[in-house]
Amino acid sequence: MDLDTLTAAMHAFVERKGWYRADSPHPQTSKNLAISLVLEAGEVLEHFQWSDSPADPAELAPELADVMLYLLQIASINEIDLGQAVMDKLKLNDGREWDTP
C-alpha cells in the first residue's frame, strides 16, 4: 500500500472522529502530534524492555501502526512529502561515514 493511500485513510479517520474541528478536545497541531508520536514510540519500546525481541509480534504491530499514523499526519499537515523526504535522507546518508568500533 502506498503512502498516499495510507495518508488519505488516516485523514478520513481523523475527520470522522472530529479531531480536525476547531472545538476538538484533541487539537491536531504539529506539537500535539509530535508528542503523541513520541508517546507511541515509547509503547513500541516497551515490547523490548526485557528482551531483544517482542514476546508477541501481533501485539507490537498496532503500536508500530500508531507511530506510522502520527508520522504520516505530521508530514501531511506540514506539507512534507514523506516519501521524498525518506529518499533525500537516504541519499544524504549514503555519502556519510560512521565510525565503527
Image (cartoon, rainbow, N blue to C red):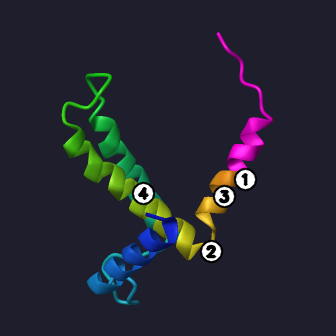
Between the residue at mark 2 and the residue at mark 4, the CA separation in whole angstroms equals 16 Å
Quick one: label 2 or label 3, which is nearer the N terminus? 2
* Label 2 residue SS: loop
Decide: is 1 above or below 4: above
Do the CB atoms of the residues marked 2 and 4 lie less than 8 Å apart? no
Residue linked to disc 2: 79
* Label 3 residue SS: helix
- Look at the image and tell me in which quarter the N terminus lies: bottom left
Residue 37 lies in the magenta stretch: no
Residue linked to disc 4: 68
- How many numbered markers are drawn? 4
Between the residue at mark 2 and the residue at mark 3, the CA separation in whole angstroms equals 11 Å
* x, y percent for residue 15: 35, 85
Residue linked to disc 1: 88
Query: Residue 50 is drawn in which quadrant?
Result: top left
Amino acid on which disc 2 is placed: Glu
Residue linked to disc 3: 85
Highlighted range, magenta: 88-101
In this rendering, the label closer to the viewer, 2 or 3: 3
Residue neighbourhood size for the residue with mark 2, other residues' Cα within 10 Å, grouped as few (<14), some (14–19), many (≥20)? few
Between the residue at mark 4 and the residue at mark 1, the CA separation in whole angstroms equals 19 Å
Query: Residue 12 is drawn in which quadrant?
Result: bottom left
Residue occupying image coordinates x 50% and y 66%:
3
The residue lying furthest to the front in this view is 1
